Amino acid sequence: IPVENTRESLLDGKYTTGAGTNNGTQWIQTTCPYPVPVASVTIGPLHKSNWGPQWGNGGSLQYSYDNNNWTTVGTIAYMAMQQQKIDIDNVTAQYWRLFHNDWLCTSRFIFK
């Protein structure tokens, strides 16, 4: 079953909708219209068909100022049916992504 891969599916609070990638070096990215300060990012595992917490663990949360050079600020450590909040030291950046060298999914991608 394919995932929605929409903004709405990442904000609806459900663990059964979200975004996912194929196998290999891929990512799920948010591009803001301008750099924004971020104190935390909340993500969560996707529970749909064959998707689950294993598809993301060990991946990373990264930011970039130019969409080319990326800095890691957190590690994905999903637990079934639980949100993961990654606290960040108020980084201001325009580009944010979840990155993994394997399958990757998330049911949330919320910035505070």
Image (cartoon, rainbow, N blue to C red):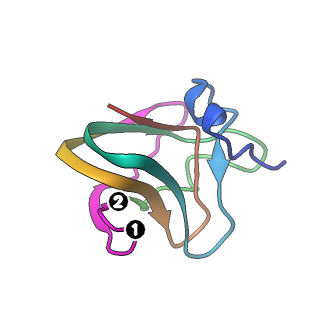
The nearer-to-camera label among 1 and 2 is 1
Q: Position of residue 23 (x, y in %)?
A: 66, 71
Chain part drawn in magenta:
62-85
Q: Residue 77 in the image: state x and y as whole percent.
A: 40, 49
Which quarter of the figure is the C terminus placed in?
Answer: top left
Residue 42 spot, x, y in % from top left: 40, 36
Q: Of the residues shown, which amino acid type is indicated by label 2?
A: Gln
* Magenta stretch contains residue 35: no
Circle 1 sits on which residue?
A: 67
Q: Is residue 33 above or below residue 70?
A: above
Q: CA distance from mark 1 to mark 2?
A: 11 Å
Q: Nearer the viewer, residue 96 or 42?
A: 96
**Residue under the point 58% across and 38% down:** 107
Q: Observer-nearest residue: 38 or 52?
A: 38
- On the question of residue 90 being in view, the answer is yes
The crowd level at tag 1 (other Cα within 10 Å; few <14, some 14-19, many 20+) is some
The disc at residue 62 is 2
98 versus 111 height, above or below: below
Packing grade of label 2 (10 A; few <14, some 14-19, many >=20) is some
Rendered image quadrant of residue 43: top left
Residue 75 at least partly seen: no
Q: Residue at x 67, y 41 (%)?
A: 6
Q: Is residue 68 left or right of residue 5?
A: left
Q: Are marks 1 and 2 in contact (CB under 8 Å)?
A: no
Q: Amino acid at mark 1?
A: Asn
| In magenta segment, residue 78 | yes
Element marked by disc 2: strand
Foreground pick, 111 / 55: 111
> Residue placed at 56% from the left, 47% from the top?
53
Decide: is 60 above or below 90: below
The quadrant holding residue 15 is top right
